[in-house]
């Protein structure tokens, strides 16, 4: 079944085929049992847990810089373009968008599984395994739709979402159905529906953290509602997640030496997923000194997340335990989502409790809790710690898109390369990435204006 996953992805990504028109080879031996479908889901090296569609947004988010020599050495045009917020016409220059193509390849595989598993009528003893397959496929499809929406659609606005273009929503395996872009509202409704349906049938004890769970579905719902600025729902689902899994690591007990100090599948991880581009390699990526300076002397994240290299400081704090960036779901994010929801509702004691519960596990020596009774000040503390805690998780781009709407938290991004300064201002059209060029040519869907 692992071979099948490779074949499906290879067919989708073959030359001259876009995902809408892809026609997988029906002569392949298709899975026919629950175990077959689970094996296809578990083939994470080829399908669902690797190279999620968050990479170009993270490159664009402004928390790091690279030298001009490093920029010239990048393997792909789209990495260079994302770094300088290039206009649409020059963004890809004939390259396929890896985030777009691979994201929709995984969506297609999820649809294969969803169609196939419905043809199996499980015996009573098989129902948990059947539910896990269906729930997992729904979760994976929602995960990719969410990640794609954060890069290729505008940020969510409750009034404009009805008319703003969203994603082409491929919901079945019939590739002969012509699709155009849905509305942004329909895109988010589909993500939420898939996740709620997944949560209803998934269990809370996945055999491996690369498999989805009920708490993973709740956590992704919390992340989705946060992007929608529905803070009540985001807080509710963050709380539902933490009712099931709320562990936090004590950073003072992490190893004091080694290249990477945080272990893969650590107790905070709810769902394991990664993304990676060559620009993120430690021999290129240099963390913004202004960001480094926001960490207090006794904040262990400064030494756990970052390390010195010849040209400055680079990042090593991935929850994947290596150079790949962690793009999955973890409890620290949920504490911060719930804290933000509390702060925005004026529940300052609850917000500060969540914030302090997190920060005391990141501190060297005695920790002095943060206190305050001013709502804006508390909210600002939560948002500051969110950026510091969740750095290089593929979340900053989404946060910029929503927070830039509020003048109190808006950010002007700038980078200098070979003497030229590049700027990205709040509300700029370049906060939406161009859709894959071959997709535009073959399917005729509308390109994003930048």
Image (cartoon, helix red, strand yellow):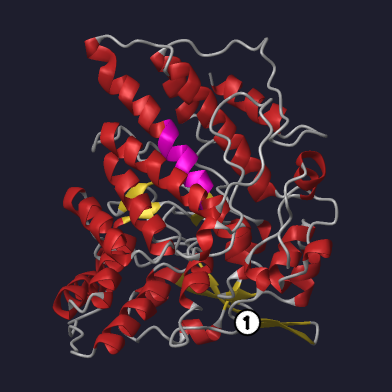
Q: Is residue 348 left or right of residue 281?
A: left
Query: At numbered mark 1, what does the secondary structure look like: helix, strand or loop?
Result: loop
Above or below 375: residue 216: above
Whether residue 246 is visible, yes or no, is no
Q: Residues within 10 Å of mark 1 (few under 14, many from 20)?
A: some
Whether residue 87 is visible, yes or no, is yes
- Read off the residue under disc 1: 425
Residue 432: where, in percent of width, then height?
A: 64, 64
Q: What is the magenta range?
A: 137-146
Above or below 306: residue 148: above
Closer to the camera in the image, 393 or 11: 11
Closer to the camera in the image, 312 or 255: 312
Above or below 38: residue 258: below
Image quadrant where one finds the C terminus: bottom right
Q: Residue at x 30, y 48 (%)?
A: 218
Q: Is residue 6 left or right of residue 321?
A: right
Q: Quadrant of residue 76?
A: bottom right
Q: Quadrant of residue 67?
A: bottom right
Extreme residue toward the left, this view: 349
Q: Residue at x 24, y 51 (%)?
A: 241
Q: Residue at x 25, y 77 (%)?
A: 343
Q: Is residue 78 left or right of residue 292?
A: right
Q: Quadrant of residue 15?
A: top right
Closer to the camera in the image, 160 or 23: 160
Residue 51: where, in percent of width, then height?
A: 58, 47
Residue 227: where, in percent of width, then height?
A: 43, 63
Residue 411: where, in percent of width, then height?
A: 53, 83
């Amino acid at each position: 079944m692992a071979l099948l996953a490779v074949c499906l992805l290879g067919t989708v990504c073959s030359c001259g085929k876009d995902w809408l028109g892809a026609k997988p080879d029906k002569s392949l031996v298709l899975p026919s049992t629950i175990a077959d479908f689970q094996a296809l889901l578990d083939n994470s090296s080829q399908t669902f847990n690797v190279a999620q569609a968050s990479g170009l947004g993270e490159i664009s988010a402004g928390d790091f810089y690279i030298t001009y020599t490093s920029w010239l050495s990048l393997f792909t045009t789209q990495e260079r373009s994302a770094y300088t917020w290039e206009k649409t016409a020059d963004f890809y220059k004939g390259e396929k968008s890896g985030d777009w193509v691979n994201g929709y390849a995984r969506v297609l595989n999820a649809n294969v599984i969803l169609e196939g598993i419905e043809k199996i009528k499980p015996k009573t003893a098989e129902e948990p395994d059947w539910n896990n397959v269906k729930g997992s496929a729904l979760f994976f499809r929602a995960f990719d739709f969410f990640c794609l929406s954060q890069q290729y659609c505008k940020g969510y606005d409750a009034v404009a979402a009805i008319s703003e273009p969203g994603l082409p929503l491929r919901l079945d395996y019939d590739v002969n159905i012509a699709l155009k872009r849905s509305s942004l509202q329909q895109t988010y409704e589909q993500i939420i529906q898939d996740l709620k349906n997944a949560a209803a049938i998934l269990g809370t004890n996945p055999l491996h953290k690369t498999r989805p769970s009920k708490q993973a579905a709740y956590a992704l719902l919390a992340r989705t509602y946060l992007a929608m600025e529905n803070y009540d729902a985001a807080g509710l689902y963050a709380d539902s997640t933490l009712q099931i899994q709320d562990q936090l690591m004590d950073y003072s007990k992490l190893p004091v030496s080694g290249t990477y100090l945080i272990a893969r599948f650590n107790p905070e991880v709810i769902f394991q997923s990664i993304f990676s581009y060559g620009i993120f390699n430690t021999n290129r990526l240099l963390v913004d000194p202004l960001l480094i300076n926001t960490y207090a002397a006794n904040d262990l994240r400064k030494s756990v997340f970052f390390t010195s290299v010849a040209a400055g400081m680079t990042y090593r704090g991935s929850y994947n335990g290596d150079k790949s960036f962690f793009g999955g779901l973890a409890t620290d994010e949920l504490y911060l989502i719930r804290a933000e929801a509390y702060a925005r509702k004026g529940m300052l004691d609850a917000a500060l409790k969540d914030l302090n519960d997190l920060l005391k596990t990141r501190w060297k020596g005695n920790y002095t809790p943060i206190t305050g009774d001013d709502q804006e000040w508390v909210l600002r503390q939560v948002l500051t710690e969110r950026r510091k805690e969740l750095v290089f998780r593929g979340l900053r781009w989404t946060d910029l898109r929503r927070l830039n709407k509020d003048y109190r938290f808006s950010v002007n991004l700038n980078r200098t390369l070979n003497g030229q300064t590049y700027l990205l201002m709040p509300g700029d059209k370049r906060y939406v990435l161009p859709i894959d060029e071959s997709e535009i040519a073959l399917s005729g869907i509308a390109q994003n204006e930048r």
